[in-house]
Image (cartoon, helix red, strand yellow):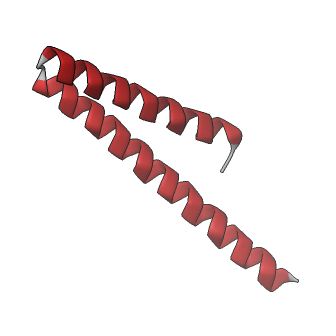
Amino acid sequence: MGTDDKMENKGQDLKGRAKEAAGSVTGDDDLKNEGRADQAESSVKQAGEKAKDAIGDIKDAFKK
């Protein structure tokens, strides 16, 4: 996982947390749900990048 990808995912997660918190404080369920969706998307991207890294590690192990 590249540093840029990690930073982008972290930024999306933080943005989602902020939206969820703002939605909770203001009673805006749409904003709250949008924040949760941003966080979920970030988690899915992160999991995909980890899987891609693991596959690369396995390929490298067989090359040796």
- Measuring from the top left, give residue 19's x and y in whole percent: 30, 23
Say which of 25 and 8 sits in front: 25
**Going by the picture, which residue comes out furthest to the front?**
25
Tally of marks: 0
Above or below for 32 versus 40: above
Above or below for 64 versus 23: below
Q: Is residue 41 left or right of residue 7?
A: left
Above or below for 61 versus 49: below
**Going by the picture, which residue comes out furthest to the right?**
64
- Measuring from the top left, give residue 18's x and y in whole percent: 35, 23
Q: Residue at x 41, y 52 (%)?
A: 44
Q: Is residue 43 left or right of residue 29?
A: right
| Quadrant assignment, res 61 | bottom right
| Quadrant assignment, res 42 | top left
Q: Residue at x 34, y 36 (%)?
A: 38
- Measuring from the top left, give residue 2's x and y in whole percent: 69, 45
Q: Is residue 55 left or right of residue 11?
A: right
Q: Residue at x 26, y 18 (%)?
A: 22
| Quadrant assignment, res 3 | top right
Quadrant including the C terminus: bottom right
